[in-house]
Image (tube, rainbow, N blue to C red):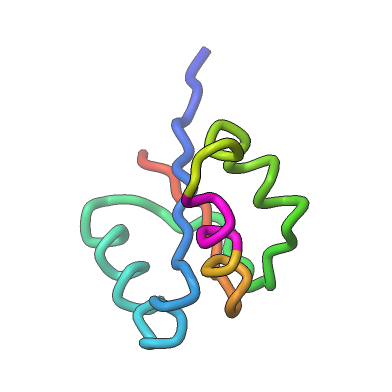
Amino acid sequence: MYVRERTLIAVKPDGVQRRLVGRVIQRFEQRGFKLVGLKMLQVSEELLSQHYCELRMKPFYPSLLHYMTSGPVVVMCHHSD
């Protein structure tokens, strides 16, 4: 059975603000990855709490939450053939 490896890529608020989403997609496509899903969203603290569960007790966690909720994030899924 062949299982394709999928890669999650997130362009964080500063990358979205600096209009780098297209460049990020281009770099992955040039390396042979195929874009299979893309979504722009405002990430909730609840989702971040799940995603960064191992970091919740770190002293920098509140500033990480502030940064990640400061603007939209573009998340995408790529796979390689």
Queried whether the magenta region covers residue 64, the answer comes back as: yes
* Residue in view at x 72 percent, y 51 percent: 47
How far across and down, in percent of the image, does residue 67 sit?
Answer: 52, 69
> Which picture quadrant has residue 29?
bottom left
How far across and down, in percent of the image, does residue 37 sit?
Answer: 58, 58
Residue 43 lies left or right of residue 71; in this view the side is: right
* Residue in view at x 36 percent, y 41 percent: 80
Residue 21 lies left or right of residue 45; in this view the side is: left
- Looking at the image, the residue that sits furthest to the front is 59
Residue 72 to residue 31: above or below: below
How far across and down, in percent of the image, does residue 11 sit?
Answer: 44, 67
Task: Name the chief secondary structure element in magenta.
Answer: helix
* Residue in view at x 45 percent, y 43 percent: 7
Queried whether the magenta region covers residue 12, the answer comes back as: no
Residue 17 lies left or right of residue 70; in this view the side is: left
Residue 56 to residue 70: above or below: above
11 and 29: which one is in front?
A: 11
26 and 54: which one is in front?
A: 54
> Which picture quadrant has residue 44?
bottom right
Circle count: 0
Residue 55 lies left or right of residue 28; in this view the side is: right
* Range covered by the magenta-colored residues: 60-65
> Which picture quadrant has residue 34?
bottom left
Residue 25 to residue 52: above or below: below
33 and 11: which one is in front?
A: 11
